[in-house]
Image (cartoon, grey):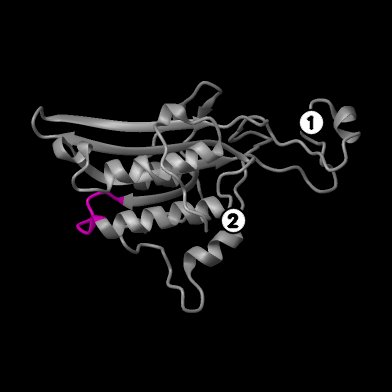
């Protein structure tokens, strides 16, 4: 796959390409390199968690089911509407919870390719191709609900984690970058994605100060 170029910062993110560039450059440079400015004065504690939530797609027999102006969309060949917001319960939940089967085959390993699950500092609690419900993430990872500019998001989603206390940081960084390229190429983030959140914690022993860091990207339908 093509190499992902260097990028600036989180506030420069405007689209999917920007997001993947940030994830594959600034994040590992800051968190997974022993001589980074962040690690000079702070200790990353526990796991880095990358989580996303996805909206459902309309059924093939009624692609305009979720459209506000169905008559207009029907005149556009191949067009369909996705849910604009995520509803987690009630009679009409709009969240996609289906397995991402193509990614599953690659992530779990096949043939001579070993499974990535739990290897080289990757967490073994979640799999990025499998939906994790809110009650599970709250219990296992104390994942928190978030309020963004568009809506409030619960603790569920598709999750992958990395152990920031891994002794072999070089192997961790390599695994993380390799996974970001895989997830990008497999379109883990796409038009169904409504939120992506990156979360981790650090401790500063000089000031005895803990910091919980959360970076939220909201992706309304275009």
**161 relative position to 201: left or right:** right
**100 relative position to 222: left or right:** left
| Magenta stretch holds residue 43 | no
- Residue plotted at (32% across, 32% down): 213
Decide: few, some or many residues near mark 1? Use Cα within 10 Å; few <14, some 14-19, many ≥20: some
Q: Gap in Å between the C-alphas at discs 2 and 1?
A: 25 Å
Judged from this view, the residue extending furthest toward the top is 149
Give the SS element for disc 2: loop
Question: Could you say which quadrant of the image residue 68 lies in?
Answer: top right
Is residue 146 positioned above or below 125 on the image?
Answer: above
Judged from this view, the residue extending furthest toward the left is 206
Dot 2 or dot 1, earlier in sequence: 1
Boundaries of the magenta span: 163-169
The C terminus: image quadrant: top right
Numbered label attached to residue 67: 1
**Is any part of residue 93 visible from this angle?**
yes
């Amino acid at each position: 796959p093509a190499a992902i170029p260097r990028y600036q910062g989180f506030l420069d993110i405007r689209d999917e390409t920007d997001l993947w560039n940030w994830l594959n450059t600034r994040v590992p440079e800051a968190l997974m390199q022993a001589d980074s400015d962040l690690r000079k004065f702070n200790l990353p504690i526990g796991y880095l968690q990358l989580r996303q939530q996805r909206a459902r797609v309309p059924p093939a027999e009624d692609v305009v089911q979720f459209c506000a102006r169905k008559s207009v969309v029907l005149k556009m060949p191949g067009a369909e509407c996705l849910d604009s917001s995520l509803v987690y319960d009630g009679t009409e939940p709009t969240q996609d919870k289906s397995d991402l089967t193509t990614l599953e085959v690659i992530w779990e390993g096949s043939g001579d390719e070993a499974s990535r699950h739990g290897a080289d500092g990757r967490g073994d609690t979640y799999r990025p191709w499998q939906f994790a419900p809110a009650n599970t993430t709250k219990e296992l990872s104390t994942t928190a609900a978030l309020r963004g500019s568009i809506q409030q998001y619960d603790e569920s989603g598709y999750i992958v984690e990395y152990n920031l206390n891994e002794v072999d940081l070089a192997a961790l960084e390599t695994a993380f970058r390799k996974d970001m390229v895989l997830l990008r190429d497999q379109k883990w983030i796409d038009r169904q994605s409504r939120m992506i959140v990156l979360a981790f914690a650090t401790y500063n022993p000089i000031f005895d100060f803990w910091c919980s860091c959360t970076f939220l990207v909201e992706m309304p339908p275009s």
